[in-house]
Image (cartoon, grey):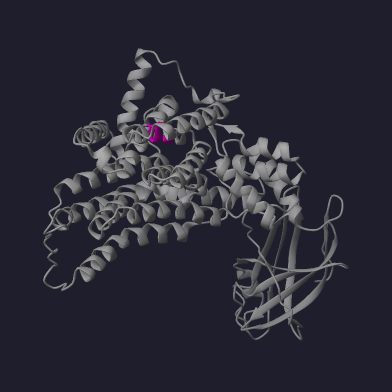
Amino acid sequence: MPVAARPIPFLRTERAFVMAIAGFALVPVAYVLGRAFLVSSNVAYWDELDTALLLLLRLDHGATWQEVLGQLFALGNEHRTFTSRLLFATSYWTTGTVNFAIIGAIGNLFICGLCGVLVYYAGTTARRVRMGVLLAFLLFQLEHYENFQWSGASIDHFQVVLLAGASVIGLSRGTRGGWLAAVLFAILATFTLAHGIVAWAVGALMLGAERRWHRLTGWLVVGAITAAFFFYGFTFNPGHQIGAMGGGEVGRVLRYWLTLLGAPLALGVDAAAPFLGVALLALVGRALARGAFARERIAMPLALWAVGALALVAIGRADLTHGHVYSRYYVLGALAWALVLFVQFEEWQETARPYRPLLRVMPLLALFNILANTEFAHDAQSWVICRDNASEYYQRYGLDGMGRFTLHPDPAYASRLLREVEQAGIYSMPRLCKQRWFPDAKVAASLSYYVDRIIIDDQIVTIEGWAARPGQVSAPDQIHLVLQSTKTREIYTTLPMERPDVTTAHPEENWGKSGFRFQRRRWLLPAEDFQIGLLINSKGNAEFVMTAHHLDMRGKGVGILANGE
């Protein structure tokens, strides 16, 4: 008769004990997801211009179904990212646009989904706790900042691990339905990122080890067809410099592979990563020698998939990265470590005290998580600064490449593409001045203002001036610009400007913050002749005045400042 688990004295039931551990493990999860949420933004950045915006633009131009399929399965940088492209296309078909903040949230849900299914299928409560704690502290930390903060990485690099994991889980069920599900998920993994193809090799090992020969034959046939389709018309990006596998190249790839494997535990110490990679391979070999592949029918095969996936990454990226491990790749190594350590914990576990080994290691896991967050916090913040700086300068000038950082390696290409998708109305970068509605706005009885300048160029329309209510303190968030044509009325927020000259001219008033600047990309404004108005919204009381100034957006465009104001 099995001995019951002994709970900690101050936690009188095993349920309370498990809930306490789960709450502790959720801390890193909440921290990383919360941080990702706070920095999320609907900004098209680097890969997203090519994988998403270019696809949506072609769909908007009226592609045939054959052309649509061609675009969905198109080869790019040695990958066929069908699943993410299908998600972008679905967003366009259902909403007419794409929002990269939402796409990033979906990507983060993929890694949460993987952890959820791995915990669920771990089996007993004790095994689920061990699996959950390891995944929480190894996967939810800032080594993975690219994936968590950027939909361009998470939507593929988090999605492929979920699909590979689902394929392994399907095969582990040992049923016909599980086999069919595994086939579907392996196909999707292959057409998410190139290393998803490793799922077929791992699945073959699982079926062969269980002597399921009939299903192994079917698996190999479907896998061969999938691989043939994947490699049909396959070419290497010449910029990636994937060399021939000579002696020196093999050594470089092998070292990079070991670095990829060990990097998650190296905490930024590059010299230590290859040795930790060797340690991980040694743990994998030890586990296999002790029969873990048959005993742990999910954790061990998925760990092998992660190790094999990193081997493909090493072959494809050793020359391009010059040995540097990009944040997006850490998820594979961290997943492998979590699963292999889980297998090791299962060997150490005691029937009477199933949580004792975990409790002994949890302080180390927490310390590792804190050190990883500390080590990579600067890189995570720098990535956000680069993206936001490029976005801010694009908003200001309507062109990429005007600041220190760019939205795309080819700023001229990015500028053309962004202008085209914005003109088509299928996506828009963030705007400095946003549209607002004031249906109850009234004509102002008294409002002082002055429009200093109206500037129109090929990219940006700028209107500057000041506005205030007599006898009231001016506030920067109150001033709005009204554009009234014979067809439409549009109201926009403005950017605040200090106006010491207004204070000097009106010393009896508190109008130092009455300045405004309206700025909008030219192609976002209708080609109409607008009368310019100013609206002040204070404490829910919106009042406006229409001026004698005009903004004529027809043809080349012209700003008309009225005399005498």
Residue 426 falls left or right of residue 179: right
Asked whether 181 or 415 is in front, the reply is: 181
Is residue 402 shown to the viewer in this render?
A: no
Residue 44 falls left or right of residue 532: left
Residue 379, x across and y down, in percent: 39, 46
Residue 64, x across and y down, in percent: 76, 40
Quarter of the figure with residue 553: bottom right
- The reply to whether the magenta stretch includes residue 522 is no
Report how many numbered discs are placed on residues in the image.
0
* Residue under the image location 71 percent in, 73 percent down: 437
Residue 269, x across and y down, in percent: 26, 38
Asked whether 80 or 467 is in front, the reply is: 80
In this view, 142 is above or below 197:
below
* Residue under the image location 86 percent in, 55 percent down: 554
Residue 333, x across and y down, in percent: 33, 39
Residue 355 falls left or right of residue 322: left
Quarter of the figure with residue 420: top right
In this view, 369 is above or below 250:
below
Is residue 515 shown to the viewer in this render?
A: yes
* Residue under the image location 29 percent in, 40 percent down: 300
Q: Residue furthest top?
A: 246
Q: Residue furthest front?
A: 214
Magenta part of the chain = 199-204
Asked whether 549 or 339 is in front, the reply is: 339
Q: Main secondary structure of the magenta part?
A: helix
- Identify the image quadrant of the C terminus: bottom right
- Identify the image quadrant of the N terminus: bottom left
